[in-house]
Every structure is written in C-alpha cells, then in structure tokens.
Image: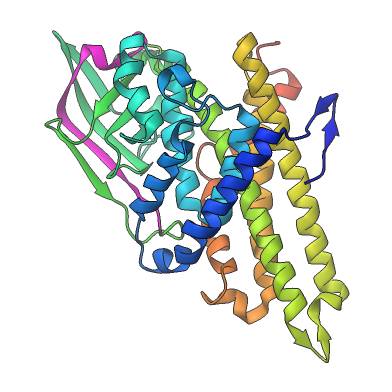
Amino acid sequence: MSAIGTAGINLDLSEEQRSIQETVRDFVDARIVPVAHENDIAHRLDMGVIEGMAELGLLGAPIPEEYAGAGLDFVTEALICEEIERGEAAFRTLISVHVGLNSLSLLKHGSEEQKQRWLVPQATGAKLGCFGLTEPGAGSDVAAMAATAVRRGDVYVLNGQKTWISYASVADHALVFAKTDPAAGHRGVTAFMVELKDTPGVRTADIEHKLGVWAGSTGDLFFDGAEVPVENRIGEEGDGFRIAMYSLDQGRFTVAAGAVGVIRACLEASVRYARERETFGKPIGRYQFVQGMIADMVVMYEQARLLVWSAGHAKNKARETGARTTRETSMAKMVATEYAFKAADLAVQVHGAYGYSAEYPVERYLRNARAPRLYEGTTEIHRMMLAEDALGFRSLDGRK
C-alpha cells in the first residue's frame, strides 16, 4: 500500500500498523470470508468469529492498556474496521457499537469505578456492550426522544423503547439515553449504563426482515419500570446529549472506515470477475465501459480511505488536545458510505446477471452497504451539518 500525503500529514503506515493490518486480513480470510455467504443466508450471527476478534484484541483496540485494551491509535482502528467489513459488515457493526459508541464513551465520561466495572470487561471481550439512542419517533432529532428516567431514591425508573439497536439481544449492557427533565429538551437528557440480562423490566426483541446485514443482530430495547441504580448514571443529569454527540463521533469514524472495506471488496471482486469472464472472445475487463466502472471504484477507494485516515490523525491529536473531530468524522462518514453503496452497485453491474445472484458476494455487499447511509446520521444530516459549519451557522470543531 503506497504512502499518501495531504495537508502536511504523513500517512505512511508504521511497521506495527502493517503487521496488525496483515494479522486482521489473515483472520478475515481464514475465519470470516469462507462462511460469510452461509451465515448471511442463514441469518446466523457467528459468535465464534466474535470470540476470535476478542482473542486478537480487536474489541478493545483503541482502549488504553490500563483498562485492558490494546492502546492502538485511530488510524490502526480504521485499518481494522476496513479489513473486518471487507469480510462481513455485521462484525464491523459490532466494533462500532461495542468499541466506538460504548467503550470510548465510557473512557471519556465514565468514573473510574464505572471503567473498571464495564470498560475493562468490554475491552477484553468478556462482556459485550451496545448503544441505546434511537427511538421509533426520535432518530436524527435526539431531543424528541420519549424515554424517561425518574429518580426515586437510589434508583432511576426507566420507561420507553429504543429501536434499531445493533446487538440489542446479544449485549450484556447498553449505554441508554432517557429524559430526566422532559421539559428541558436536549438539556434534559441523561445517560445510563443498563444491565440487559438481569434487570427486571428490561426486554429485548430482534428485528426481522431487514434489507441487509442478515448475519448481524439488530433489535429493540423495551423498558417498563426498569430500576437502574444511581451509580449506573454516566456523568450528571442533563449531560446525556453531550455524551451522545461525543459517542456518535466515535461510532461514525468506525462506520466510515468499514465503508472503505466495502469499496475495496467490491473493487477486488470486480477485478477478478472482469479478468475471468469472457465475451466475444476476450475478458470483459478489456471493454471500455467495464474499465470505467473499475476506475471509478479505484478513485472512490482512494478518496474514502484518505478522508478516513485524515480523520484518524485528527482523532489521534484530539486525544492530546481535547479538540472535537465532528467535522472530520462527519465528512468521512458521509463520503465513504455513499461511495460504498455506489461501488457495490457498480460491482453488481460488472457482474451482470450473476451480480444479482447470491452466487457472488457483490449482491450481499449492495444490501449491506445501504444501511450505513442511514444510521449514525443520514447522508442528508451530514450534508446539513457540514454546510451549516461552512456558513457559520454552527460549529463542528469549536472554532466559531
């Protein structure tokens, strides 16, 4: 992989980064790719793969070693996500919710006791975490959430529903957001860590008949008078919106990095097919129209990867300065996920009728690439954010 430089940033990979990249690539080729089609068709979540990811330290990659993580930087995290989603989107989704949305939020906003209680077992993969923000009537408009948490002595009584929660029925606990002051809008949102498996009043249910990510877990969280101890509150009352926005910055980065893996998978599959498939006595890769589609995928891959790595460098610096990286992660997420869907569509076109069949992986790439354009901020939301930042109507990095 050649070096890329932009804006004074050296994007050469270190020997350690290359070694980790190769290790994860080998893992994906050995453990994920051979059974990806079978697991997808069967709608089966392969827990053995998750155990393997934990053994490699991938479920705590950017978490400091003092909390049982690998202490890796964010560019390396991007490399991991790219390789994992090249094999199967469901497992990169786990990294997004478990590491990006949950663990990194705990690292930033949790108390020391909370980090020892939840972050350490999450970093090792002994426990799985998920993220409960979206509701049936509240997606991009977080302040419209209807879930409530009323304090009664040493507990909060939680009522409401969260939906489209990745790993809802698999995770041990969830970072959940609810209104402690419904009249205060987004300033009335508070964050809690909720134990999902042994808290009375908590129920999970899987969402069936999804368009894609069949090999993953997506579901609903239901809270009916669930009592959550006060010590499970993350931050203070009213801190929830700020915590959620920080969480999304972390999750969006992993989504963007995974989308780069989809583009690469589409490119590699299309190149193989275009060299092997012959019409009129020569490989279809010799035809200009097919070459144009291949060239588009090459450019999309390089552009998306560059934005993701640039955002990774910004996030590495932010660990020292505390600066926000909303602009960088938003741009990378918007571009990479749009390109991933376009690349998958082109890959299907290159494969012709076979691209519409499960005989080749590109139809799975197309189905799986649709959801990232919706979750953790739709493409339209990110366009609005970036435009309003440029216009000076809002600040995505704290400068205005």
What residue is at 13 percent from the left and 8 percent from the top?
153
Q: Where residue 282 sits: x, y (%)?
A: 83, 86
Please, is residue 119 above or below residue 137 in the view?
above
Relative to 141, 388 lies left or right: right
Q: Is residue 118 above or below residue 216?
A: above
Pinpoint residue 222: horizontal percent, then vertical percent. Answer: 23, 38
Residue under the point 48% across and 24% down: 63
**Which residue range is magenta in the image?**
215-236
Residue 207 in the image: state x and y as whole percent: 32, 53
Locate residue 220 relative to residue 6 in the image: left or right.
Answer: left
Q: What residue do we see at 71% from left, 61% from top?
A: 267
Q: Residue at x 29, y 19 (%)?
A: 117
Quarter holding residue 14: top right
- With 89 as the anchor, is 337 left or right in this view? right
Q: Is residue 15 visible?
A: yes
Vertical position of residue 48 compared to residue 226: above or below: below
Picture quarter with the C terminus: top right
| Residue 32 shown in magenta | no
User: Is residue 370 among what the camera can see?
Assistant: no
Q: Position of residue 238 (x, y in %)?
A: 37, 11
Name above or below for residue 237 compared with residue 179.
above
The prevailing secondary structure element of the residues shown in magenta is strand
Q: Quadrant of residue 237?
A: top left
